[in-house]
Image (cartoon, rainbow, N blue to C red):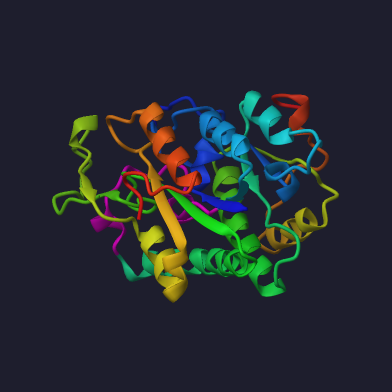
Amino acid sequence: MRGDGRSRRVAVVPDAYLNPAAGADDHLVRLAAAGWGVVALPQPGLAPEVERAALTALADQLTAFLGDGYEVALAEPDDPIAGRLTAVLAAAGRSLPARVSPLAGPGS
Amino acid sequence: MVVCYLAHCLLNANAKVDEGARCAGVSTPVLALLRERGATIRQMPCPELAFGGTRRFWAVREQYDTPAYRAHCRRLAEPVAAQVRADLAAGNRVVVIGIDGSPSMGVELTAADDSWGGRPNKPRDEDYPVTPGAGFFTETLLGLLGDDVAAVRAVGIGQDLFDYDEERELAKLGAILSGGEGSGAR
């Protein structure tokens, strides 16, 4: 591998980071400025089978990052959809570090 | 409202094939444009990351053209297609933003060459065989949409092109977000 400018840091974020409410803090812009890449959780309100398929796809992608030593952080561990992702990962024998705050900066 | 379905790597360059990341993580010029236009953002999965991992070699369509990879793309595209249909049913405009030059996420341009395979022997950027056509994931997603595809605009940002011109690509995207066709859109 020759490398490039990637950060090797991935934040798993809720839909509210991609689409903040009017007047809310823009966490996605802050994460971008700090060099994080983001993996977005599905938006709330999807049919259960659609959300499940989306979470399974996310788990596959995150497993690839985890397997190669990338830093992967849950931005909002208490988010209910993040919780369901954690369950999908656990079923595959994977876990994400708890209570990591990507907004606090690299390596936090 | 316009809802933009972004290729995964536009928000996470860590998913790119090695040497392909043009930024640390989020493509901030694309994000800034979408924020400026008030677009709703949705992120599509990266089919190559989940299939080949972070250490995959550069590849062209012929190397990914297997029943397993096509099934993988379909599995990933099905929930995206369901969300696109829901957004269309809610009266939103939908724009799919792919990566031109990608064998998976290309819209107008992909990469294809019968001679690729076996020992990697195409080290130069200039050897990357950009070809008209869509990538596997894009064509799978648009196919799943059936008749609804007529209501969807798709555009490729040329981040996998040797001569990537960010200003040109942003102008193309901006025109489509404004409701125009722009060049390189379907």
Tell me residue A20's x, y (percent).
75, 42
Of residues B24 and B141, which is closer to you in this image? B141
Q: Is residue B99 above or below residue B90?
A: above
Tell me residue A42's x, y (percent).
68, 57
Residue at x 75% of width, y 46% of height: A16
| Relative to B181, B4 lies left or right | right
Tell me residue B4's x, y (percent).
55, 50
Which residue is most to the right? Answer: A78
Q: Is residue B134 visible?
A: yes
Residue at x 62% of width, y 37% of height: B35
| Relative to A79, B182 lies left or right | left
Q: Which residues are magenta?
A: B44-65
Q: Quadrant of residue B123?
A: top left
Q: Is residue A32 above or below residue B180?
A: above
Tell me residue B44's x, y (percent).
54, 54
Residue at x 17% of width, y 50% of height: B113
Of residues A98 and A5, which is closer to you in this image? A5
| In magenta segment, residue B54 | yes
